[in-house]
Image (spheres, rainbow, N blue to C red):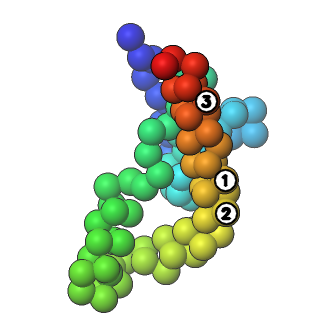
């Protein structure tokens, strides 16, 4: 059974961010992932909606510029991480065969 994630608003002054090992997806929500769980997504549903809308209609929904900046800033890390996962899966697949 998975343990629930702790979510706190960044404006909640009772939540001590300095002492927590946090992963911040946006400046307003702080999530602390379970130590045993790997995130299985890159984009939230809202981010997917923003990207799909732009690709289909060239319309830039609210948050588009920030999302574009984050994509540009993170693209090398994302590609490197994906290649690492693919190498791991390829190596373990060879051993299983």
Q: Which residue is mark 1?
A: 80
Say few, some or many: other residues with alpha carbon within 10 Å of mark 2 (under 14 / 14 to 19 / 20 or more): few
Say few, some or many: other residues with alpha carbon within 10 Å of mark 1 (under 14 / 14 to 19 / 20 or more): few
Could you say which is closer to the camera, residue 91 or residue 47?
A: 91
Q: Is 57 placed above or below 34 here?
A: below
Residue 27 visible from this viewpoint = yes
Image x and y of residue 6, in percent: 50, 30
Can you tell which mark lies on residue 76? 2
Could you say which is closer to the camera, residue 75 or residue 94?
A: 94
Q: Residue furthest front?
A: 97
Q: Residue furthest right?
A: 18
Q: Secondary structure at mark 3?
A: helix
Q: Is 6 placed above or below 24 here?
A: above
Contact (CB < 8 A) between labels 1 and 2? yes
Label 1 or label 3, whichever comes before in sequence order: 1
Image x and y of residue 62, in percent: 37, 77
Q: CA distance from mark 2 to mark 3?
A: 23 Å
Question: Looking at the image, which residue is at 31% across and 80% down?
Answer: 55
Label 2 or label 3, whichever comes before in sequence order: 2
Q: Secondary structure at mark 2?
A: helix
Say few, some or many: other residues with alpha carbon within 10 Å of mark 3 (under 14 / 14 to 19 / 20 or more): few
Q: Quadrant of residue 34?
A: top right
Image x and y of residue 87, in percent: 62, 39
Can you tell which mark lies on residue 15? none
Q: Which residue is mark 3?
A: 91
Drawn side of residue 43 relative to residue 20, left or right: left
Q: CA distance from mark 1 to mark 2?
A: 6 Å
């Amino acid at each position: 059974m998975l343990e629930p994630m702790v979510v706190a608003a960044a404006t909640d002054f009772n939540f001590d961010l300095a002492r927590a090992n946090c992963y911040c997806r946006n400046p307003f929500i702080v999530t602390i992932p379970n130590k045993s769980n790997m995130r299985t997504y890159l984009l939230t549903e809202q981010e997917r909606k923003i990207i799909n809308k732009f690709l289909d209609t060239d319309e830039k929904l609210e948050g588009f510029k920030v999302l574009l900046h984050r994509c540009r800033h993170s693209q090398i890390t994302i590609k490197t991480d994906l290649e690492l996962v693919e190498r791991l899966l390829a190596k373990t697949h060879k051993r299983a065969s």
